Image: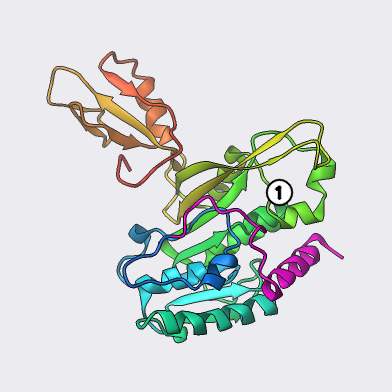
Amino acid sequence: MSYLDTTKDIYKDAALTPNVGLCCTTNPIWELPGLKIPKIMQEMNYGCGSTVHPRDLTNNPKILYVGVGGGMELLQFAYFSRQKNGVVGVDVVDEMLEASRINFEEAEKLNPWFKSEFVDLRKGDALALPLEDNSIDVAAQNCLFNIFKEDDLKAAISEMYRVLKPHGRLVMSDPICEQPMNEALRNDERLRALCLSGSIPIKDYVKLLTDAGFGTIEIRARKPYRVLNPKHYNTEELIYIESIEVAAIKDPMPKDGPCIFTGRAAIYFGDTEYFDDGKGHILFKNQPLAICDKTANALKNLQRDDLYISESTWHYDGGGCC
C-alpha cells in the first residue's frame, strides 16, 4: 500500500466521522454578510489556513478547489461566484465528496442565496485533474500539497499550472519547516497524511512553483502551526512547523527571474519629491512601496543613503513594484 493509499484511508475516516483535531487552522472562521457556515463544515475544516481572499475573486471567476474537505471553502468561494458550476470541487475520496454534498444541503437551509448547483463536485486526482487546459481563473488547495512526496508534488503543481488561464492564480495554504527531519519522520505515512512530516523549507516550496513556470509568487502570511516534540514523536529535537498562505500567479516568467513578494518595502527619504531607478520603479518621498525580493536586492546594491529597504515580513497584500 502506498503513502497515498494511507492518506485516502485517513480522509475516508474523517469524512465518515468528522475529526475536529485532524488539522489546526490558524485562521478564525469568518462569516461575511449573509454567509452562514454550517457547524458540520466547521468541524470538517481540514486545513492549516485560508485560501479565500476577496481580491482574488472579482469579475465572476471560474474557481477550482482540490481536496474538498467538508465543503467550507467551497461555500465561501460560491459566496463570491453565485453561478451554476462556478466552483469546481475535486477529490479522490468518494466519502468526502458525498459528505460535502450532504453539507451543501445544510448550507442551502442556512443561506437563502446559496444553491448546491453553484458547486460542481467531481471525482478526480490532483495528479491528473479532470479539467481542460487554461479553463480556471483561481485554483486553490489547503493543506493538500504538503502530503505529496517530491515527484508527486511536482506533478500536482504542474497540473494546477496547466488548468489555469494566463494570469490565473493558484492560492495555497501549507505547512513549512526550516529544520531538517530525520528519515523516520519523513517516511511516517500517517504523519505525512496529517500534513506534518511532508513540510519543506519555504525556499524549496517557492522554487517548485517557479520551476513549474509561475512568474509571480506572493507570500501572504506566515504563522506558527505545530511542534513535533521528542516525547511524542520519533525525533531527538523539537521540530517547529509553520503554515504559509501563498499565491502563485501564471504570469510570464521575467527574463531576470520570478518576482517573489515576501513583504519587503522600500522607502525613499531624500531631498527630491521622488526617486526613479530607471527600471520602472518610482518611489515617492516617505511613501513605502511594496517590492519583490529581486527589486529589493537591486535597490540595495545601489548603496544609496536615502533609501531604506526592509527585511521580509512574510506578509504581502498586493500592490507594489511589479
**Residue 11 magenta:** yes
Q: Position of residue 221 (x, y in %)?
A: 46, 44
Q: Nearer the viewer, residue 20 or 320?
A: 20
> Where 225 sits versus 35, above or below?
above
Q: Nearer the viewer, residue 301 or 267?
A: 267
Residue reaching furthest to the top: 305
Which residue is more in the foreground, 269 or 254?
269
Q: Secondary structure at mark 1?
A: loop
Judge whether residue 95 is colored magenta: no
Question: From which residue to which does the magenta span run?
Answer: 1-29
- As drawn, the residue found furthest toward the right would be 1
- Residue sitting at 41 percent across and 74 percent down? 78
Q: Residue 290 placed where, x, y %?
A: 32, 37
Q: Amino acid at mark 1?
A: Gly
Residue at the spot of label 1: 198
* Nearer-the-camera pick, 182 or 248: 182
Residue ID at (80%, 44%): 185
Q: Is residue 322 left or right of residue 237?
A: left
Q: Residue 160: x percent and y percent?
A: 55, 63
